[in-house]
Amino acid sequence: MQWEGIREFVYVAESGSFTQASKKMIISTAQVSRQISALEKRLKIKLFYRTTRKVSLTEEGHIFYQHCRGALDALDAAEQAITNLQSKPQGKIRLTAPVTYGEQQILPLVNSFMERYADIEVEAYLTNLQMDLVEEGYDLAIRLGKLNDSSMIAKKLGTRTHYLCASPAYLEQEGEPQSLAELNQHSCLLGTLDYWHFKDSSRDKNIRVTGRLRYNSGFALVDAALKGLGIVQLPDYYLKQHLTQGDLVTLLDNYRAPDDGIWAVYPQNRHLSPKIRLLVDYLAEQLS
């Protein structure tokens, strides 16, 4: 009886929503509400302020949450200690990753990983939005570039390189830029940002660029560059094949920005289960 409603209470407290808690636990919203009402009745205190638009903790609820979160973490750790004794990792992993990088790099590796471990299930959601891992119930996120400050734990899986490049046909017609200042004389193929990132005299430098084309698709930008429409700056996984084949040529290599990180990110209040640790280590091995 003492444990009834505790997990429901913690999930509602963390998500601020009965609906989100029910999705995470795969039970009905009504069941979550009943369990918390019963818990409040048993404790003889009000844990939440409820309105039609918002659910928030009372003062007593805040105190109770701090103790319950630690208790659940300890319980999860006990269960995972038993899982560690199993010879085969098993269970579901929910992960999220950026769309293009996920399609090209992460999910093919996940497929190879699943060939090794037949008892592991994976549910992946690709999005360029930064998901709330706790609220949305994800075990793991793959993130690129500089990480924002957060309470998440991050493990570096590898790095990516941004190349500035153009087609030989474009360079033959327009000439090759010899300095960052000369970029304003060229047709620049723009993505979602108005600037490109470089390193100049050991300093990071953002250069504002302009052009008559702007896409939020890396593949479309590569196609435009291949057709001689201008100069583009993109991560290596868009360009490797074309650079190897000579369809595109790198430019201003002395000004290339330092490589940035590829990260596995997960909530710090969750113990990394064996199946997730195995996947993170496998990705790091393949991407390093």
Image (spheres, rainbow, N blue to C red):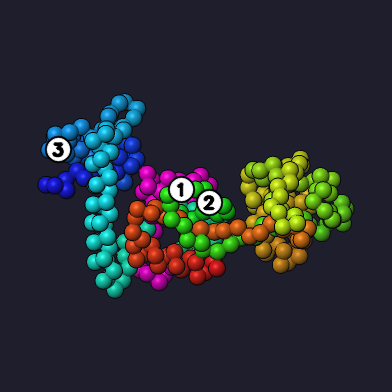
State the separation of the CA atoms marked 2 and 1.
Answer: 8 Å
Amino acid under label 1?
Ser
- SS at badge 3: helix
Label 1, on which residue?
Answer: 150
In depth, the one of 162 and 101 nearer the eye is: 162
x then y, percent, for residue 71: 23, 52
- Residue 60 drawn in magenta: no
Q: Are marks 2 and 3 in contact (CB under 8 Å)?
A: no
Amino acid under label 3?
Leu
> Is residue 116 among the parts visible in the rendering?
yes
- SS at badge 2: loop
Q: Are marks 2 and 1 in contact (CB under 8 Å)?
A: yes
In depth, the one of 124 and 34 nearer the eye is: 34
x then y, percent, for residue 147: 53, 51
Examine the image and state in which quarter residue 280 appears.
bottom left
x then y, percent, for residue 157: 51, 63
Label 3, on which residue?
Answer: 43
- Residue 114 drawn in magenta: yes
x then y, percent, for residue 273: 34, 62
Q: Quadrant of the C terminus?
A: bottom right
Badge 3 crowding class, 10 Å Cα cut-off, few under 14, some 14 to 19, many 20 or more, is: few
Report the number of discs: 3
State the separation of the CA atoms marked 1 and 3.
Answer: 33 Å
Badge 1 crowding class, 10 Å Cα cut-off, few under 14, some 14 to 19, many 20 or more, is: few
Q: Which residues are magenta?
A: 111-140
- The residue lying furthest to the bottom in this view is 87
Label 2, on which residue?
Answer: 147
Amino acid under label 2?
Leu
Residue at 75% from the left image edge and 55% from the top image edge: 200
Residue at 84% from the left image edge and 45% from the top image edge: 185
Dot 1 or dot 3: first in sequence order is 3
Examine the image and state in which quarter residue 123 appears.
bottom left
